Image: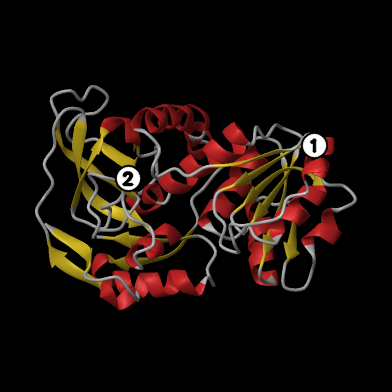
């Protein structure tokens, strides 16, 4: 099969379209003929050698989410059949013509959606549901702050929280990105290049924060959280070692938590997929949540797609398509 291979760790040009053995399947695995693969910033980290794939997953093929058609089922598969169109959350290997994955990490392509849109869903939807609605326990009527509102995670968080009745504020790096977030359902945006989000939100505060920045943001996050507020970390691009005002955390009864998804056990991902199908798929099929696709590239231009992703000038997902 054809796949995009990390020939060595480094810049985008190390990604080359190559030949690779088609994966086999067993047990409850399905073999998917990939039609589209979503790009994520973690793919860049893997390409640079800073985010190894979990055991049993090809280290040299990035890609955490795909859509396509099931062409073969293992003997223990019960939920799907050959010919079903699905999207899937992967541990890696998505930039390929075929991928094998256990059926519990697959979801049917939502009614009326094409493969491009479906490929943009798994990583962001699973991450947002797990962190904002499970760990962060966001409820209707509460205020949510998302750092990085124009990211794939951000635009998913905006739409889901808005659809489920929460007020959403985002931080962004430009006025244009902020306006796009408003169009998606955000109630307000803060341009972190010209405004201090702590000062802007100090008076009213927020109930839940989804943070992928870390570093100096921690103390500001703690200061603007309301009593019983929840701070959820999904990355720490500004630094992972921080100072925490423990007495203030105690006085406010704050919950500071976080998670990673890629390394979680299969049973967790399977249960998460069930919750996503129950709670998110109806919002998609009713039009309350729509994927935002910024640009598509053929698999042969994966390096160019990575360069665009690194520029961080986009709002929405970048997707490889066949």
**Residue depicted at x 46% and y 72%:** 310
Is the C-beta separation of discs 2 and 1 under 8 Å? no
Residue 250 bears which disc, if any? 1
Residue lying furthest right in this view? 203
- Dividing the picture into quadrants, the one containing residue 82 is top left
Give the quarter of the figure containing the N terminus: bottom left
Residue 100 image offset from top left, x and y in percent: 20, 42
Rendered residue at 45%/69% (across/down)? 309
Q: Position of residue 271 (x, y in %)?
A: 42, 26
Name the residue: 22% across, 44% down: 56
Where's residue 52, x and y in %? 33, 55
**Dot 2 alpha-carbon crowd within 10 angstroms: few under 14, some 14 to 19, many 20 or more:** many
Front-most of 208 and 296?
A: 208
Q: Which residue is mark 2?
A: 90
Does residue 53 appear to the left or right of 204 in the view shown? left
Q: Secondary structure at mark 1?
A: helix
Quadrant, the C terminus: bottom left
Q: Categorize mark 1 by other alpha carbons within 10 Å: few (<14), some (14-19), many (20+).
A: few
Q: Rounded to the nearest whole Å, what is the CA distance between mark 2 and mark 1?
A: 38 Å
Q: Is residue 152 left or right of residue 42?
A: right
Would residue 225 be found to the left or right of residue 50 on screen? Answer: right
Q: Which mark is residue 12?
A: none
Sequence-earlier tag: 2 or 1: 2
Q: Is residue 61 above or below residue 144?
A: below
């Amino acid at each position: 099969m054809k796949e995009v291979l990390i020939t060595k760790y480094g810049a985008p040009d190390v990604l080359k379209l190559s030949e690779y053995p088609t994966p086999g399947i067993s047990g409850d695995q399905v073999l998917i003929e990939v039609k589209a693969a979503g790009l994520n910033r973690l793919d860049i980290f893997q390409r640079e050698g800073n985010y190894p794939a979990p055991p049993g997953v090809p280290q040299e093929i990035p890609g955490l989410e795909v859509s396509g058609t099931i062409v073969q089922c293992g003997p223990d598969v019960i939920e799907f059949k050959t010919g079903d169109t699905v999207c899937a959350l992967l541990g890696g290997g998505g930039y390929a013509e075929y991928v094998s994955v256990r059926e519990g990490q697959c979801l049917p392509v939502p009614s009326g959606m094409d493969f491009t849109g479906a490929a943009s869903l798994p990583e962001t939807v699973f991450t947002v549901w797990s962190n904002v609605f499970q760990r962060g326990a966001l409820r209707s009527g509460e205020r949510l702050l998302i750092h990085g509102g124009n990211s794939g995670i951000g635009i998913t968080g905006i739409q889901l929280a808005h659809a489920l009745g929460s007020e959403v504020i985002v931080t962004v790096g430009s006025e244009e990105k902020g306006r796009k977030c408003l169009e998606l359902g955000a109630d307000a945006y803060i341009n972190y290049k010209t405004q201090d989000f702590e000062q802007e939100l100090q008076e009213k505060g927020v109930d839940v924060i989804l943070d992928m920045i870390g570093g100096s943001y921690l103390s500001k996050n703690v200061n603007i959280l309301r009593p019983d507020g929840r701070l959820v970390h999904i990355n720490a691009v500004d630094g992972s070692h921080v100072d925490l005002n423990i007495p203030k955390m105690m006085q406010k009864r704050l919950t500071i938590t976080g998670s990673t998804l890629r390394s979680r056990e299969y049973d967790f991902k399977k249960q998460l997929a069930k919750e996503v199908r129950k709670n998110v798929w109806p919002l998609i099929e009713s039009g309350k949540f729509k994927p935002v696709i910024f640009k598509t590239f053929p698999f042969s231009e994966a390096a160019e797609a990575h360069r665009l992703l690194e520029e961080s000038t986009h709002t929405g997902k970048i997707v490889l398509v066949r």
